[in-house]
Amino acid sequence: MKTEKIKNIITVSLLLLFFTSCGIKSNSGNLNPSQRAEISRDTLLQNKLHLLLELSENQIEAGNREAIHTAESAYKLADSLNLELEKAKALNFKGIVWKIWGDNQKSILYLFEALGIYQKLDRQSDYAEVLMNIGETNRAAANLKKSLEFLNKSLAIYTRMDDSVGLAKNYNRLAATLYEMDLNDPGKNEKLYRSIDLGKFDFDKIYHSNQTFKQKYDSIVMYANMSNVYAHKPNLADTRISNEIILSALYTTTFQLDKALTGYDLVLKEIKETNSRSELPLALYNIAILHYKKKDYDKALFNALESFRIASELDIKTYIVISSGLLNLIYQAKENYKEANKYMRIAYLGRIEYYQKDIDVKLKDMQYDFDIAGKQKEISYRNSQLWFLFISFLTVLFITSFFIIILITRNKRKKILNEELNSKNQIILTQNEALSKLNATKDKFFSIIAHDLRGPLGGFMGLSQIMAEELSSLTTEEVHEYALSMKNSATNLFHLLENLLHWARMQRGSILFDPKYWALLPLVNESVEMIRESAKSKEIEIDIPIPEGLMVYADKNILQMVIRNLVSNSIKFTERGGKITLSVEAKNGKIVQISIKDNGIGMNRALVENLFRLDVRTGRLGTEGEASTGLGLLLCKESVEKHGGKIWVESKEGNGSTFSFTLPANDKCNEAKACEALSH
């Protein structure tokens, strides 16, 4: 695997030399016109840039420190060509190489810059990769909570995209971070090595009795195994090796030492097969820790020295620092204090150098801020007089504008007030006109009512006068006839006054409106029963095909008044021997339509149009001279509308009339047998 990467590096380097030489010849003017047309300077530079990016990636994978310079060259070239995507790639590589070779602060700065570009370009896969690299740099800097935060963000994107390569690497870094966070605190290593007695550590007992330990242990194993599931491609051998190192280190930390040795054997075998030297120092370091815990100091020393040697060759400062720290502990255990002090010094200086770079960057940032602040003060001092003049001008302009705004605001307020006043006057005028029309309508209505009252009263008075003056001369039949006429006049007068009183109470809102759910059939039967004698006297049949169980939502008294008025109206205008039918129809399960149909004399179009108007006289005599004022129909209209329903009439002169109105229904009735009956 590493051999292939080295071949790639050599191939890309040769191609770079070729394109560079082509670029020099082009600048020297040695190309003929056709060659200049075919290969432009920008094309050459772009090809060179792509080769630099490829070379940088191969150098990173091979653990070649030259990747630092290659990534920097790629970044400068991409910046000069204003190629944002390639610039972001170069920044990402710079972040990776500076993390590997020991400057986490630079790494974070470059990675965040790359992250911003990828976000603008909406490159989700690249964006997720940089998030993962930021998480890895935070892990290297021991900022483990931040590391988990960024790794979980990148994991969400990789999962959504089903990116197997990204998922393999992401799960690997999650396993490493959780291991360091929960089971391998670097600051406690020395105390751990010295204080734990092998004979007293029982992994199975702790695993099954300590739920917190079990959860952390299982999470690390799960992430490493998930990474292995996705890391099936040949180019992810480094990821598989890293997973085995993490698991073996976990076994070492939990004193499953035989299991750890088996794991490290597999690691060394795969490193040898793939020639993956970048992971070798870490593997040897962990093997040394294992032997140190077993107090096999000779084997621990051998592996720690190898880890230190290879890390020094590759110039990977993190591994140099941790392997030298372990060598210090091993030599102390072997009582070779001279060598122990030597490696303690190396570890100490390495840590100082490692963290000093972060401090230097922060100091440079502070110096930069200080320089900027100094220049700003100098500019502020030089331009103070100009600012004074400018502020003076603004002050005068502000005062002038302020007074202008006050004047404009006052005028606007006056205009708004005038508009509001005109609007209110218009509303009052409209209301007065409507009130005048309403008063005129009511005056006409009362005139109609007065005329209707005069008829029954006049007849009653005339008959009573005849009976008073001529009673002794009247026969029994004549007295009976006069008494019957007086009774009819009194009955008509009573019904008229009753309707008038009911209408007046509705206008005042003094009628109690108490709607409830009622079974319709009993309510209709009760209403019709009160006027059935009138129908019998004219031999009129009343048919009520209303199903049982049908419910309506209404005020019982008001609804019965509506039914009585409409049925009474049909009786008046139906010939002797006629028929009246009360039917019902459910509409969408929400409303009920009640219809009163007769085969009486019907109405012409003009009468139908004015039937429910207050200001038009619609009363006429029934088929046998029954009086009618039209007030009952007005009461029906207002009563139905009070329930939220509608009322209308369909009629043709000579063919009878059908009065229909709607009421709210009980939704549950649609599930009842009554509703099934309605559908038939």
Image: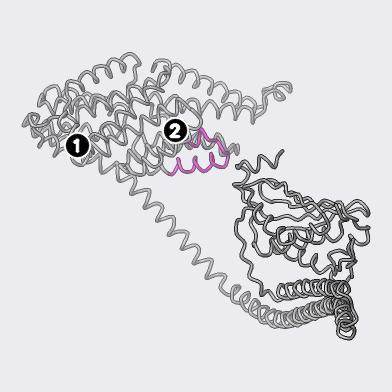
Rendered view: 85 above or below 428: above
Residue density around tag 2, few if under 14, some if 14–19, many if 20 or more, within 10 Å:
some
In front of the other: 114 or 163: 163
Say whether residue 260 is visible.
yes
Q: Nearer the viewer, mark 2 or mark 1?
A: 1
Residue shown at 16% from the left, 29% from the top: 203
- Helix, strand or loop status at disc 1: loop
Q: Give x and y (percent) for residue 93.
A: 45, 33
In front of the other: 531 or 140: 531
Question: Label 2 to label 1, Cα distance in Å?
Answer: 50 Å
Residue that mark 1 sits on: 210
Q: For this view, does 302 lie left or right of residue 519? A: left
Residue that mark 2 sits on: 69
Q: Give x and y (percent) for residue 81.
A: 60, 37
Name the kind of residue labelled 1 in the image: Asn
Residue density around tag 1, few if under 14, some if 14–19, many if 20 or more, within 10 Å:
few
Name the kind of residue labelled 2 in the image: His
Q: For this view, does 157 lie left or right of residue 512? A: left
In front of the other: 660 or 295: 660
Q: Quadrant of the C terminus?
A: top right
Q: Main secondary structure of the magenta part?
A: helix
394 in magenta: no
110 in magenta: yes
Rendered view: 80 above or below 260: below
| Range of residues picked out in magenta | 109-129
